[in-house]
Image (cartoon, rainbow, N blue to C red):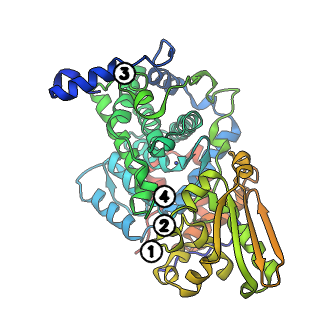
């Protein structure tokens, strides 16, 4: 079916069990100098204690509003992607397992909470249109809403419990993103979803601090995603990796509830996360969101376009260049300047100039800039196979170079993701457009009306206006909802 056009501007094994050669290598590892002094209480325990102590009453009005906003936006993204091939495959796999009390969004059927978290997470992320957060790397915390919904429903949790869990999963994920850049060592951002989801799921299961700790230990040790997911030719897994982390973390919480223990201390241990993956740092859990301390969900942005974070401002800059040039035939060359991470993710590698998959194209600054200039927009249809093969676009992209500008790198933060496009015309004239942010970024947050407009664009082709109005009204009143299953059942898509 036709997808909506965007009508707005808008993530230790024991040595005795090893072979002799491995025991020697392990002994050498254990003999290396110790990590810097760590707080006496392991980080997993401190995160678990924070999760256990957080209450709905600790959330301020702005945070509750942000939870609703990000939930509405995420659900709309999931419905828009309902018919896409990878989404359908993952949904069918989840539904093939008998039993379960968690809704598969868009259907009237249910699955186990871990598989529902996976299938729904794939749909939410598929179009790369859901939210983002920039710390020391870029994450998509709304990917984890799928796990919160699945566990809340299966546990028959209250709506306020769900809201608290969503605020919690954002807080832990974003604070870990603030503390570490594991991408420089070849790991992928969904690593931070593992403890975040395990703790939010465990909280919805009403686990005590000890079992919450075990859930985080199991989740983090059992699943470490590699950065290969987001380099070279990108695959379906780009949109599935965080959903799989959510599935794994929900399962970890279920194991912990049953009494299974996990490796400890999972962060500070001799072969733990700090030594093997991230390097060491102290994380002050006392600075996390709580009554009187702002929550990180309020620093998360909502995307205006279905494209990678560092391309968002470049889309507006491309529209401006197109307007200034008058005719694209006048353009001889284009230089796109972006931050270091933007260059690494969207402007390096020959595949970015000849994308053959949607997943590569929506992470290609050359393609997105060229397609924007030709079509005047970026929508879900911008990545149709025939558009990727368009000879006009492929020829135009040869005029484009992408560079890192250290000044833009220095300015990039949670509120600003700048891009600059410079075009040289046939007469030598230089056109420049530099954009810092777009509607939906923290510096230009969407209003309720703008959030609703994006939601309508995503679900509009499937539902009559009155149904959309009713669903939106229910979601804005989420804190007063009495039955989460009934609420999620209203999302069933007519096929």
Q: In this view, does 394 lie to the left or right of 416?
A: left
Q: How crowded is mark 2: few (under 14 residues within 10 Å), some or many (20 or more)?
A: many
Tell me the element at label 4: helix
Q: How far apart are marks 2 and 3 (CA)?
A: 38 Å
Gap between marks 4 and 1 measured at Cα? 23 Å
Give how far apart the Cα atoms at labels 1 and 2 are.
Answer: 7 Å
Residue 489's x, y, as percent?
44, 58
Q: Circle 4 is placed at which residue position?
A: 124
Residue closest to the far top: 40
For the point 48% across and 11% down, the residue is: 40
The reply to whether dot 1 and dot 2 touch (C-beta < 8 Å) is yes
Q: Residue 279 location in percent, x, y? A: 49, 29
Q: Which of 339 and 263 is in front in this view?
A: 339
Is 293 situated left or right of 122 in this image? Answer: right
What residue does disc 2 label? 360
Return the residue at label 1.
Answer: 356
Q: In this view, does 116 lie above or below 278?
A: below
Q: Do the residues labelled 4 and 1 touch (CB within 8 Å)?
A: no
- In terms of sequence position, does the residue under pointer 2 or pointer 3 come before the other? 3
Q: Nearer the viewer, residue 301 or 59?
A: 301
Distance of label 3 from label 1 (alpha carbons):
43 Å
Seen at 29% across and 33% down, the residue is 255
Which SS class for mark 2?
Answer: helix
**Residue at numbered disc 3:** 270
Q: Which comes sooner in the sequence, label 4 or label 3?
A: 4
């Amino acid at each position: 079916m036709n997808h909506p056009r965007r009508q707005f501007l808008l993530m230790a094994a024991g040595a005795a069990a090893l072979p002799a050669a491995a025991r020697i290598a392990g002994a050498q590892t254990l003999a290396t100098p110790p990590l810097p002094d760590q707080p006496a209480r392991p980080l997993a325990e401190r995160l678990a204690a924070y999760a256990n102590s957080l209450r709905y009453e600790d959330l301020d009005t702005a945070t509750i509003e942000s939870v609703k906003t990000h939930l509405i936006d995420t659900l709309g993204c999931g419905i828009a992607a309902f018919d896409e091939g990878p989404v359908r495959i993952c949904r069918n796999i989840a539904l093939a397992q008998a039993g379960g009390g968690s809704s598969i969004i868009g259907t009237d059927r249910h699955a186990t909470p871990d598989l529902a978290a996976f299938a729904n997470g794939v749909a939410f992320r598929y179009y790369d249109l859901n939210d983002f957060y920039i710390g020391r790397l870029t994450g998509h915390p709304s990917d984890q809403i799928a796990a919160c919904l699945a566990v809340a429903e299966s546990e028959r949790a209250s709506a306020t419990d769900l809201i608290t869990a969503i605020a919690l999963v954002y807080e832990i994920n974003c604070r870990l993103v603030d503390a570490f850049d594991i991408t420089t060592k070849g790991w992928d951002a969904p690593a931070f979803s593992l403890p975040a989801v395990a703790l939010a799921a465990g909280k919805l299961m009403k686990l005590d601090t000890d079992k919450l700790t075990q859930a985080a230990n199991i989740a983090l040790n059992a699943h470490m995603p590699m950065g290969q997911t987001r380099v070279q030719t990108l695959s379906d897994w780009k949109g599935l990796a965080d959903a799989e982390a959510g599935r794994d973390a929900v399962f970890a919480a279920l194991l912990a509830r049953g009494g299974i223990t996990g490796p400890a201390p999972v962060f500070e241990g001799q072969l733990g996360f700090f030594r093997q993956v991230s390097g060491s740092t102290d994380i002050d859990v006392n600075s996390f969101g709580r009554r009187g301390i702002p929550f990180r969900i309020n620093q998360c942005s909502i995307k205006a376009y279905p494209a990678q974070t560092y391309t968002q401002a470049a889309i507006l800059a491309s529209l401006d260049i197109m307007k200034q040039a008058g005719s694209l035939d006048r353009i001889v060359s284009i230089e796109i300047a972006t931050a270091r991470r933007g260059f690494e993710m969207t402007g390096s590698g020959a595949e970015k100039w000849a994308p053959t998959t949607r997943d590569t194209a929506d992470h290609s600054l050359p393609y997105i800039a060229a397609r924007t200039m030709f079509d005047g927009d970026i929508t879900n249809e911008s990545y149709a196979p025939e558009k990727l093969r368009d000879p006009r676009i492929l020829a135009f992209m040869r005029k484009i170079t992408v560079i890192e500008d250290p000044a833009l790198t220095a300015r990039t933060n949670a509120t600003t993701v700048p891009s600059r496009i410079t075009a040289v015309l046939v007469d030598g004239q230089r056109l420049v457009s530099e954009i810092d942010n777009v509607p939906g970024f923290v510096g230009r947050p969407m209003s309720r009306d703008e959030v609703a407009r994006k939601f309508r664009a995503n679900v509009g082709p499937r539902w009559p206006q009155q149904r959309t109005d009713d669903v939106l009204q229910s979601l804005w009143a989420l804190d007063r909802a009495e039955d989460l299953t009934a609420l999620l059942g209203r999302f069933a898509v007519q096929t």
